Amino acid sequence: MFNYKILGILLLGIFSKSFSSILTCSEGWNLHGSKCYKLDPEMRNFTNSNKFCENLNAEMMMPKTAEENSVLSEIGLWFWMGLIDHNKTTALDWTWNDGSKLESNDRWKSGEPDNKDSPEECVISCPTGWADVPCTGIKTTVCQKKPGIIADEDESVTLTCDVKYEENITKLFWTRSMDDTSVIVSEYAKGGNVTLPSLVFEHVKWTDEGLYKCHVTTISGLTLTDETSLFINATNMCPCRCEYRRRLEHWGSKIIPNKSQEELLKELESELQKIKKELAVNKTQLSSSIRRRTSAPDKRKSSETMGLAGAAFICIVVGLVVVADLLSLVKFVKSTITFWNSKKIGEKAKDKKRKIFDINKRKTQTSESSA
């Protein structure tokens, strides 16, 4: 059984090179060349190994150069590589996990790839070379990621954005995180956009220290990120560094990166609609409209007295008019009642005369018939 402690010591020894003064790896990772590597002895299939590395914000080992392949020869274990055959029918379409094609076949083990246990679409590294195997097998995992950068103040530093599908990028920007605060990198650094993805600091300052993330959106809507840690060797720091940093983070978050007018309008559309709604004028509440409906207030005592006198005069006039109208109304009602009463009395008198006439007429007719 392989002794992983010996492997760790071995890796630590071979990873200590001239880059250690510039590049650095986080705890649990080892530096070799321009990359940090992490070996995990747990046995997994290809899919789970890939997920394991992604969860560490890293990727499966992809030894493309002779220097990177030298790491394989030192490890001497059987582990997965980030290389897969996307063409299920042949063994010639080998593609790295970052989307690039395999350019050289001189690293294969003798007789490989042979697709012996078809389908053999994944690749492992073994002490004598590469071999194609089924992706369902279980092997150990080696992850790789970009190292952090250690720089002195006023040095020129370039942070690269290494992501897949570089030709299909539609949006790209950088953020810097420090003390749980993340802000968009502003104009004090060059680049950091679609046309120039790398972020360039001509004279790096201690305030530039932090975890930088390159955020990429592809034409298909896929979102990718690439991380790089930047550490600054600074001297003669003032004691208020933390407070000053928080101020920088606060004001840095207020800076809007360079964008076209169309991009800004699209991004701010919802906010602009809210502002328009808030600024919409209700004309009925304008002072001019209110003045047309009401009198201007005047709190002087003389004004109040004049107002009361005017109101009393108006009330008296209106009252007299109402009283006069009421008297006229009463007189009209009385005359109407008198008229209708006299009319009824006249009609009753006529009815009485008519009845008397009818009685006399009947008596006359009776006496004539008797004669």
Image (cartoon, rainbow, N blue to C red):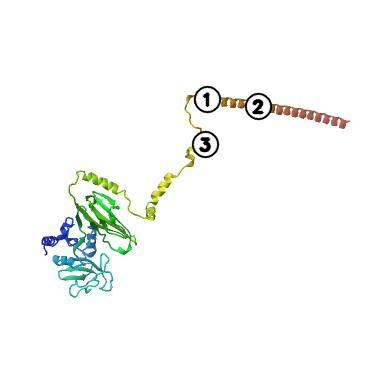
Task: Name the residue nearer the viewer: 327 or 175.
Answer: 175
Task: Name the residue nearer the viewer: 81 or 135.
Answer: 81
Task: Name the residue nearer the viewer: 272 or 257.
Answer: 257
Taking the image as shown, residue 186 lies to the left or right of residue 146, namely: right
Crowding at dot 2, Cα within 10 Å, few <14 / some 14-19 / many 20+, comes out as: few
- Mark 3 is on which residue type? Arg
Decide: is 253 above or below 99: above
Crowding at dot 1, Cα within 10 Å, few <14 / some 14-19 / many 20+, comes out as: few
Q: Residue furthest right?
A: 371
Residue 178: x, y in percent?
A: 24, 50
Q: Which mark is residue 292?
A: 3
Query: Which of marks 2 and 1 precedes in the sequence?
Result: 1
Query: Which of marks 3 and 1 precedes in the sequence?
Result: 3
The residue at which mark 2 appears reads as: 328
Residue 51: x, y in percent?
A: 24, 60
Crowding at dot 3, Cα within 10 Å, few <14 / some 14-19 / many 20+, comes out as: few
Cβ atoms at labels 1 and 3 below 8 Å apart: no
The residue mark sitting in front, 2 or 3, is 3
Q: Is mark 2 on a helix, strand or loop?
A: helix
Distance CA(mark 1)–CA(mark 2): 33 Å
Cβ atoms at labels 2 and 3 below 8 Å apart: no
Residue 301: x, y in percent?
A: 48, 24
The residue at which mark 1 appears reads as: 306
The residue mark sitting in front, 1 or 2, is 1
Residue 90: x, y in percent?
A: 27, 74
Query: Which of marks 3 and 2 precedes in the sequence?
Result: 3
Residue at x-position 67% and y-position 26%: 331
Quadrant hosting residue 164: bottom left
Quadrant hosting residue 10: bottom left
- Mark 2 is on which residue type? Ser
